[in-house]
Amino acid sequence: MSTRFDLVTIDSPATDALARFWSDVLHLHETQREDGDRWIVLSSTDGVRRIGIQRGEHRPGGVHLDLECDLDEFADERQRLLACGAREVVEPRVEGYGAISNMVDPDGNAFDLCAYVPHS
């Protein structure tokens, strides 16, 4: 399987307040939380992940796409995206949830390539 759209992520120093706002506005509910309030995922009633809220400095345009691939495809997909013109802004790393590469497109718009560890 190749890279696929996962969700839109909003960067904010106030993740809890922003999660409450978007939950109320879009009738979403929290389905994931990591490191206190560092990362919150809001999903629709059918369980589809819709918005990620990540603790970080708010900046104009502080929204980015999260793309997903299978963990065993991460290295190849990372190379494919770089060949398409993406640029890494942080060294790829492994977190508790899987692997991640923070990238920007040729125009400087941020996006992440994520490969999640399967949940049992």
Image: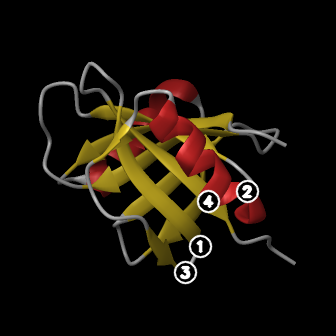
Among numbered discs 4 and 1, the one appearing first in the sequence: 4
**Cα separation between marks 3 and 2:** 18 Å
Classed neighbour count for the residue bearing mark 4: other residues with Cα under 10 Å, few (<14), some (14–19), many (≥20): some
**Cα separation between marks 3 and 1:** 4 Å
Q: Nearer the viewer, mark 3 or mark 2?
A: 2
The residue that mark 2 highlights is 73
Residue type (three-letter) at the residue carrying disc 1:
Tyr
Residue 82, percent across and down? 46, 39
Please indicate, yes or no, whether residue 8 appears anywhere in the rendered image: no
Q: For numbered disc 4, what is the local secondary structure?
A: helix
The residue that mark 3 highlights is 96
**Cα separation between marks 2 and 1:** 15 Å
Q: Please state if 109 lies on the left or on the right of 98 as rendered.
A: left
Q: For numbered disc 2, what is the local secondary structure?
A: helix
Residue 74, percent across and down? 64, 58
The residue that mark 1 highlights is 97
Q: Quadrant of residue 87?
A: top left
Q: For numbered disc 3, what is the local secondary structure?
A: loop
Q: Nearer the viewer, mark 4 or mark 1?
A: 4
**Cα separation between marks 4 and 1:** 16 Å
The residue that mark 4 highlights is 75
Residue type (three-letter) at the residue carrying disc 4:
Ala
Residue 32, percent across and down? 58, 63
Q: Which quadrant would the N terminus be assigned to in this image?
A: top right
Q: Nearer the viewer, mark 2 or mark 1?
A: 2
Q: Are marks 2 and 4 in contact (CB under 8 Å)?
A: yes
**Cα separation between marks 2 and 4:** 6 Å
| Residue at screen point 34% across, 66% down | 38
